[in-house]
Image (cartoon, grey):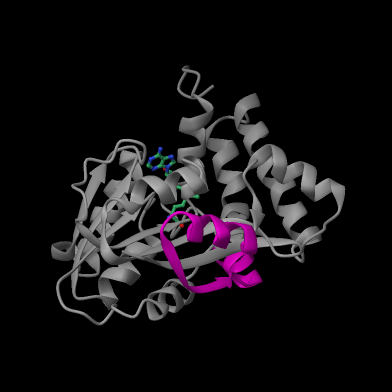
Amino acid sequence: MCNQKKMSALALEIDLHKNSARQGPGSPEDTLKALELIGISKKKGLKLADIGCGSGGQTITLAQNIDGHITAVDLVSDFLEELNEKSKLFKVDEKIKTLEESMNHLPFKKESFDIIWSEGAIYNIGFETGIKKWREYLKPGGYLSVSEITWITNTRPKEIEDYWRVECPEISTASNNIKILEDNGYALRGYFCLKEDSWITNYYEHIEARFSSFLQRHKHSESSREIVKAYKAEIELYRRFKEYFSYGFYIAKRDK
Ligand SMILES: C[S@@+](CC[C@H](N)C(=O)[O-])C[C@H]1O[C@@H](n2cnc3c(N)ncnc32)[C@H](O)[C@@H]1O
């Protein structure tokens, strides 16, 4: 309960993640590494869509490193407001337009973007569905750059397999995801997986530091305790099983 009203689990999740640099694993170094793998990143007047941008950790890095314009899309207005404030602070507001919309119903014209970017968000639509749908918004020869939870070994302990099969049923190996890209009109230009710091230092440690104030704000309601418990379990599993999974960053070119 919060202010006498029951907050939905989604509203609580948003509250836990508000005012943080990012809402998922990643880092400016990862964003720049992916950008470097895109051969056209030095071109002038690029048009880029950042889908599931959250509060824009990667959007700001992109705006600081491309000559062009970014349409940053997310479902959550609170995150977009933060991104708008940050883009003014970093003086890149003329390069970024935020759009509150679902990645399932993007209002984009066909072949309108040079680059489609999405860090840690494509799972909301599904990797295969997302790369298929978003391809039509890319200009021929345009680039897709997405990070997605990925198995980094071919076998793994049942405990972690069972966990991710429930949380993210589409989780797969890089070789399988690359095949999905190749089967759907993309040519792979690069792949790397995120290092431990991108999970622990840049993401989990920030969430852990918020647990106490979050619980206090919500008067230790059952729903808020459940959310903290679920994150603690996820973080513990990452620490125990990080040899078996990470976020894979896939950089691919629309092939025609
Ligand atoms: C794990 S966060 C990643 C955010 C950001 N890219 C980052 O790495 O910090 C996933 C983001 O996807 C957004 N999201 C979830 N479902 C969505 C949908 N259907 N359409 C657009 N955004 C969505 C969430 O609000 C959240 O900001």
**Which residues are drawn in magenta?**
174-202
Q: Quadrant of residue 40?
A: bottom left
Query: Measuring 77% from the left and 61% from the top, which residue is drawn there?
Result: 154
As displayed, is residue 83 above or below residue 4?
A: below
As displayed, is residue 217 above or below residue 175?
A: above
- Which of these two is toward me, 3 or 57? 57
Query: Measuring 56% from the left and 50% from the top, which residue is drawn there?
Result: 210
Residue 65 in percent (x, y) is at 28, 77
In which quadrant will I find the N terminus? top right
- Which of these two is toward me, 173 or 87? 173
Q: Is residue 155 left or right of residue 70?
A: right
Query: Measuring 37% from the left and 53% from the top, which residue is drawn there?
Result: 53
Residue 175 shown in magenta:
yes
Residue 135 shown in magenta:
no
In which quadrant will I find the C terminus? bottom left
- From where the camera sits, is residue 105 visible? yes
Q: Quadrant of residue 92?
A: bottom left
How many numbered tags mark residues here?
0
Q: Is residue 33 left or right of residue 240?
A: left
Residue 98 in percent (x, y) is at 23, 50
As displayed, is residue 191 above or below residue 88?
A: below
Residue 206 in percent (x, y) is at 56, 58
- From where the camera sits, is residue 229 visible? no
Residue 47 in percent (x, y) is at 20, 64
